[in-house]
Amino acid sequence: MPWAFSLLLALAVSVDGFSAGFSCGLRKLVIPFSSVLAISGLSAAAVACSMLAGSGAARLFPFRHLSVLGGAALICFGLFVVGQYVRGSQVLAKKKGGSPKAGSPPQKPRGLVTLLQRPEEADLDRSGTLSVKEALLLGSALAADALAAGFGAALIGLPFIPTVLAVGLTKLVLLPLGVALGRIALHRVAIPHAPLWGGAILIVIGIINLF
């Protein structure tokens, strides 16, 4: 069943990529394949690094306790994702005005939490196309939960290579899918609370591994 958990974890850390793609698609922001690849690779690399760190930490604890520790870590990370999203929503709710229009002066980089809420702001030069450099900025925000989740994944014994590949490939598929669906949407509607879904999935995986 580890492969099933690998797929669930990949979905948990990639659902925000789908939401970001959908938001960008609604605003007709072009994300070239090279930029999609950069974002996906960053998430895969984040999971790989954190799983290696988790594997090292696993040697410090008795084997029988690893699953419980990993489950508890995933629950904590899931709650952190939810908390960050809620806090970001509250901050954005206090701000007035819309997004800058195309052709407006370049903007300073936004915080990672803000980028999760309004991923189109990663287009710093307002060119309408997300360059690889700008994609790495957005990818850093999207990879934050992957970095945390990978540590817990290693503690509960998920296989390294399948999990890393699952995360990279899932984001590689969901991000452009979100862009495509956003472009064909008839109305400007948002994917409601999508980052919360990822946090919820991490919490569920963690709870399962506590028992």
Image (spheres, helix red, strand yellow):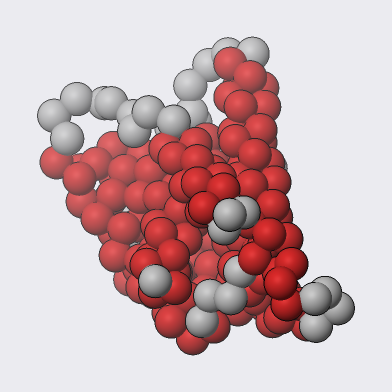
In the rendered image, which quarter is residue 197 located in?
top left
**Residue at horizontal 71%, vertical 72%?**
64
Residue 203 makes an appearance in the image: yes
- Residue 16 relative to residue 110: left or right: left
Quarter holding the C terminus?
Answer: bottom right
Q: In the image, residue 186 lies at what x, y percent?
A: 13, 29
In the rendered image, which quarter is residue 172 located in?
bottom left
201 or 135, nearer to the observer: 201
**Residue at horizontal 65%, vertical 65%?**
67
Residue 20 makes an appearance in the image: no
Reply above or below: 197 against 12. above
- Residue 125 relative to residue 185: left or right: right
Q: In the image, residue 107 lies at what x, y percent?
A: 62, 42
101 or 145, nearer to the observer: 145
- Residue 54 relative to residue 43: left or right: right
- Residue 33 relative to residue 134: left or right: left
5 or 146, nearer to the observer: 5
**Residue at horizontal 80%, vertical 76%?**
62
Quarter holding the N terminus?
Answer: bottom left
66 or 119, nearer to the observer: 66
Q: In the image, residue 175 lies at what x, y percent?
A: 34, 57
